[in-house]
Image (cartoon, helix red, strand yellow):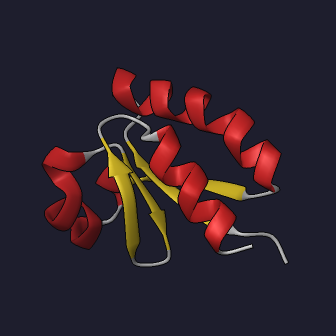
Amino acid sequence: MATELTLLSRNYCHLCHDMEVALTPLADEFGALVTVVDVDADPALEARYDELVPVLLHGDTELCHYFLDEAKTREYLAGIR
């Protein structure tokens, strides 16, 4: 079963787009599925993560925000294999 990651994003957010692009090869390497969620479409998510977007999650575990922390994300993904 593939690891499912969630990227909380906004359509007009360049940091969000940058994180999605940076995450793609890492997700491919680990066979992870990435679901991009518009944080503004969910009031609860917007209230919780508003100023932190983009946020990369695995379930309820926050892996990073603002920028992809590739080393931390790689270590995390390797540990859950």
Residue 68 vs 1, above or below: the answer is above
Q: Left or right of 19: which side holds 12?
A: left
Position above or below: 7 against 15:
below
Left or right side of 23 for 38:
left
User: From this viewpoint, is residue 72 visible?
Assistant: yes
Above or below for 27 versus 22? below
Q: Quadrant of the N terminus?
A: bottom right
Q: Please give the name of the residue rendered at 48% of the width and 33% of the height, measured from the top-left corner.
A: 19
x, y percentage for residue 17?
48, 27
Tell me: 32 left or right of 74.
Answer: right
Residue in the foreground of this view, choosing between 80 and 54: 80
The residue positioned 37% from the left and 39% from the top of the image is 10
| Residue in the foreground of this view, choosing between 57 and 8 | 57
Q: Quadrant of the C terminus?
A: bottom right
Which residue lies at the image location 35% right of the left edge and 43% below the top edge?
Answer: 54
What residue sits 18% from the left and 66% below the top?
48
